[in-house]
Amino acid sequence: SGLICSNNEAGWVQGEECIYRKNRAGHRTEECGREKEVREMEWVAGIQKAIDYIESHITDELNYEEIAKNAFSSPYHFQRVFSILCGYTLGEYIRNRRLALAGAELAADKIRVIDAAVKYGYDSPDSFTRAFIRFHGITPSAAREPGAKICSFTRLSIRISLEGGNSMDYR
């Protein structure tokens, strides 16, 4: 149902809802318009599904391939898109979320330092303490004291925000 534009060396074809380019063999190579919007929405939904997976398995050993599978993507592409959208890597997000949750548990006096280290995936209390100090600026033991100030790192939530499209009167 597409119309081939006359004298179009690039081979652009206009269909009902999208414009796409045909390669020399006549196959679609690049899509845009409505189909592109649908793919972008699928990416957003996939990233949110991956974030939900991370959050529900935050105390487990996380596999990047399994996370990317939740977003219907390869690990390489998922990590690239994630870091572009969020401004930090997937590993940084996971580490910061774990350290924030560990800090909250320690501040509430619900867990011992060694138990927090093991629960949130650290091999030793020393490596946990070093990471905790870098993130919170205080030791895990100090976080257990009343009134200790700890850092927060909230869960990601993907939202699409459309702006503009308003009419304005002007002179």
Image (cartoon, grey):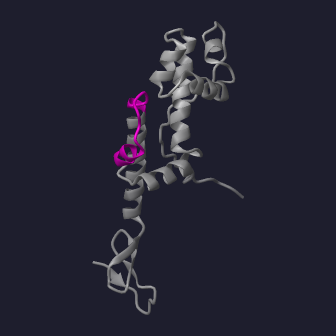
The x and y percentages for residue 54 are: 42, 36
Front-most of 3 and 102? 102
The structure residue drawn at horizontal position 40% and vertical position 41%, both measured from the top left corner, is 63
Using the image as rendered, state which of residue 103 and residue 86 is in the foreground. 103
Q: Indicate left or right for 115 with 107 as reference.
A: left
Write down the quadrant of residue 145 in the picture.
Answer: top right
Query: Considering only vertical position in the picture, is 34 above or below 124?
Result: below
**Among all residues in the image, which is located at the extreme left?**
1
Q: Position of residue 1 (x, y in %)?
A: 27, 78
Give the residue drawn at x 38%, y 36%: 53
Vertical arrangement, residue 158 with respect to residue 126, above or below:
below
Where is residue 137 shown, x and y percent of the image?
69, 24
Query: Which residue is located at x 53 percent, y 8 percent?
Result: 109
Is residue 64 shown in magenta?
yes
What residue range appears in magenta?
Answer: 55-70
Q: Residue furthest top?
A: 146
- Specify whether 1 is left or right of 166: left
Q: Where is 74 relative to 102, above or below?
A: below
Does 105 sit above or below residue 35? above
**144 to the left or right of 18:** right
Where residue 171 sits, quadrant-wise, is bottom right
Question: Exactly how many numbered labels are in the figure?
Answer: 0
Q: Reply yes or no: does residue 99 show up in magenta.
A: no
Name the foreground residue: 51 vs 15: 51
